[in-house]
Amino acid sequence: MADASDLQLPAFVDSVSSIVFHPTNPHLLLVSSWDRNVYRHDLRNASEPRKLGLRGALLDVAWAGTSEQVAYAGGLGKEVRSINYESQETQLICRHDDAVRCVEFSQELNAVISGSWDQTLRITPIDPTTSQPWPNPTVLRLPHKVYSLAISATKIVCAMGGRHVWIWDIPQLKRQLEEGKTGDEIEPWQRRESSLKFMTRAVRIMHNDQGYVTTSIEGRVAVEFFDSASEVQAKKYAFKCHRQVIDGVDTVYPVQGLAFNPHWGTFATGGGDGTVSLWDPVAKKRLRQLPKYPAPVSALAFNCDGTQLAVAFSEEDEGGADGGKVMPPGGGNGVWVRTCGDEVRPKVKA
């Protein structure tokens, strides 16, 4: 089991779908759940979270920039809504034709970016003076369902079915939007095929904005770089993880949790085997494997200063159905927050 020093948030009645720390306040954590609620936890008083419910199970949540009271969430209700914990109100941001899998907010575009199983990415600008959404979002049509989405100050990375990974350059995208171009007129900066042979589970951008990492259902992780120069592309690599030998059989688990430490540039992966591993992408080494959690890991998040790692686990998450050989049945649904030490620091060459 995880360390006794971990801060354990109150248990959830259903699976945890997404967790995200506030971009500037290291104590605030949002948690979305299949129970249709988004929880706002202040880790200084973690036993009394605030929550607001939406229609349909929720699959993702994002903070509204640096606001500590407003968030955006989406899920099986086929819409993105804002959540205001101060007014206890929600507001429609945009609608999709199928479930909303991913929600992000871009400070550079001042817009909500949502990815859906309807094979679109929608960019909905937010009026900075009224906080009202633009009534006609820009619709970027995609070849497959969206599985995972990551944004930084300069890039949007969208991982889809069919092993497609499309990348948009935000300064270029911003110019196109300001010129009034429609979604059909906007092309991605790069179209790529995943280095991993099986379905992508998660994508996250490196803390230095030089590349990104993807994970798959088949216990693998790929480290990629944005620069298309051949000497840079030669640095990309992939590796196996979250595998165990059970009764002589190599059992492979999906890698569902993925998060970069914003201070050190190391990253964490969480698997269906209930374990979390910490990695140094430069040294290409595992720094540490944390003690096993009670159920399959569904999401990971570091806080803004890299001092805490939140680990979400869900007993009915994919990858945990192994007959109880590795994961005990009834592990529950929870989020535990670990204080990070030297295990998240990159290795220093002697």
Image (cartoon, rainbow, N blue to C red):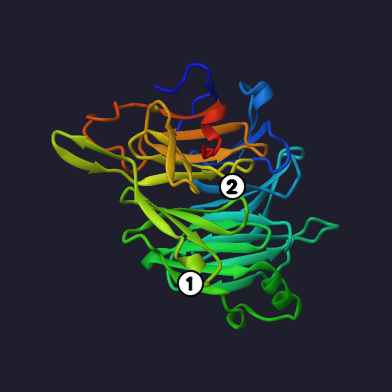
- Contact, CB < 8 Å: mark 2 with mark 1? no
Q: Position of residue 26 (x, y in %)?
A: 69, 34
Q: Amino acid at mark 2?
A: Val
Most extreme residue toward the right is 129
Q: Is residue 343 above or below residue 262?
A: above
Q: Amino acid at mark 1?
A: Ser
Looking at the image, residue 109 sits to the left or right of residue 17; the answer is: right
Most extreme residue toward the left is 248
Instruction: Using the rendered image of the protein, determine whether residue 282 is visible from the camera's viewpoint.
Output: yes
Q: Residue at x 38, y 63 (%)?
A: 195
Given this view, does label 2 or label 1 mark the residue nearer the observer? 1
Quadrant assignment for the N terminus = top left
Q: Is residue 125 above or below residue 258?
A: below
Q: Position of residue 312 (x, y in %)?
A: 48, 35
Circle 2 Cα neighbour tier, 10 Å, few/some/many (<14 / 14–19 / ≥20): many
Q: Residue at x 38, y 27 (%)?
A: 292
Q: What residue did someone put label 2 on? A: 61
Q: Is 206 or 112 nearer to us in this picture?
A: 206
Q: Is 56 or 146 nearer to us in this picture?
A: 146
Instruction: Specify which label sits upstream in the sequence, 2 or 1.
Output: 2
Q: What residue did someone put label 1 on? A: 230
| SS at mark 2 in the image | strand
Q: CA distance from mark 2 to mark 1?
A: 37 Å
Q: Is residue 152 above or below residue 68?
A: below
Q: Is residue 289 above or below residue 99?
A: above
Most extreme residue toward the top is 4
